[in-house]
Image (tube, helix red, strand yellow):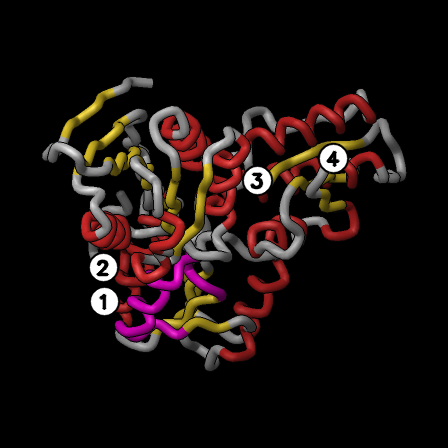
Amino acid sequence: MTLTNIQGTTTIGAKTLVRVRPRGFCAGVVRAVDIVELALEAYGSPVYVHHEIVHNRYVVDQLRGRGAIFVETIGEVPVGAVLVFSAHGVPPRVRTEAKERNLRVIDATCPLVTKVHLEALKFAREGRTLILIGHRDHQEIVGTSGEAPEQTIVVGTVEEVDNLQVPDPSRLAFLTQTTLSLYDTQEIVARLRQKFPLIVGPASDDICYATQNRQEAVEALTREVELILVVGSANSSNSNRLVEVAQRAGVAARLIEDSNDIDAAALEGVKSIGLTAGASAPEVLVEQVSQRLSGFGFTNHRDLDLIREDVRFTLPAELAAKLGRAAN
């Protein structure tokens, strides 16, 4: 990890805004949004998207304005139409339904989520009961648990682990949602290992690099400011976890959708604010929040750059071929 402080314009007596990096779009979100935009370019409007492509209202609204239609069920998609699977992944039954309707499917599932699906299949084929750590109603968990529903148990807390009953304690495996709190997940995994000593896990952590990096950045930010604002939608798991990281460190934190969500009353008496964004929140929203905070007197702007990210994911081969470009 490298640490670089870049000072902005300083005004004597002004309040301070510290913007931390990394923040905002991760490689999986960039890829998913690009896929919808390029599908619209390649096939024309409409292009259907199964669930929100990423959990951010601004992004979804922008794509809807360009001709994307977001649906909750495959039955809403006309036979033969173009359908994009969201970054969160889908269970196998959804893929089967799409095939039965002769849909032209483009898979925008984050490759790191796909990794968890493959791990779930591997453990299921070994005859293990799979303990899936995550939020059971989240689309990513719905998709992963669908790989082996009869063998999968979802847990979200240490207390749920304490109450857990399994068919064979010697044939267990665990996996995690990619957007969880590092702290909470470590506690749950530790309790699983304590209760079920023979449980096995993935070869590498399932929590994605971007989630980890943003949580570590917020933890560093808590040592710099009195209040942290996290730009992200309420249904964004990784954005909510950033709020929790700050609060666990004893710093007040709030999740805001955009600049309109800034509560002037909450800024009273505050001299320093930290600003970050969840992995599905675009930079334009960060800029708008920064401008509004300047209007509240936070005109000393400083960037705290912590971790350099250079991860890129390739486009699906079928889309790249349609556009006549290399997949990468």
**Which residue is found at the position 29% from the left and 33% from the top?**
21
- The quarter of the rendered structure image containing the N terminus is top left
* N-terminal label among 4 and 2: 4
In whole angstroms, how far apart are the C-alphas of marks 4 and 1? 47 Å
The residue under label 3 is 116
Foreground: disc 4 or disc 2: 4
In whole angstroms, how far apart are the C-alphas of marks 3 and 4? 21 Å
* N-terminal label among 3 and 2: 3
Residue 158, numbered label:
4
**Which residue is found at the position 22% from the left and 21% from the top?**
4
Instruction: Name, please, the residue furthest toward the top.
Output: 2
Mark 2 touching mark 1, by CB under 8 A? yes
Left or right, 176 with respect to 288, comes to right
The residue under label 1 is 41
Question: Which amino acid type corresponds to the residue marked 3 in the rendered image?
Answer: Val
Determine if residue 283 is in view.
no
* N-terminal label among 4 and 1: 1
Question: Which amino acid type corresponds to the residue marked 1 in the rendered image?
Answer: Glu
Dot 1 surroundings within 10 Å: few (below 14), some, or many (20 or more)? few
Q: Quadrant of residue 14?
A: top left
Left or right, 32 with respect to 166, comes to left
* N-terminal label among 3 and 4: 3
**Which residue is found at the position 51% from the left and 79% from the top?**
76
Determine if residue 165 is in view.
yes
Foreground: disc 3 or disc 2: 3
Q: Is residue 69 above or below residue 111?
A: below
Residue 323, numbered label:
2
In whole angstroms, how far apart are the C-alphas of marks 1 and 3? 30 Å
Asked if residue 66 lies in the magenta stretch, the reply is: yes
Foreground: disc 4 or disc 1: 4
From which residue to which does the magenta span run? 51-69
Question: Which amino acid type corresponds to the residue marked 2 in the rendered image?
Answer: Leu
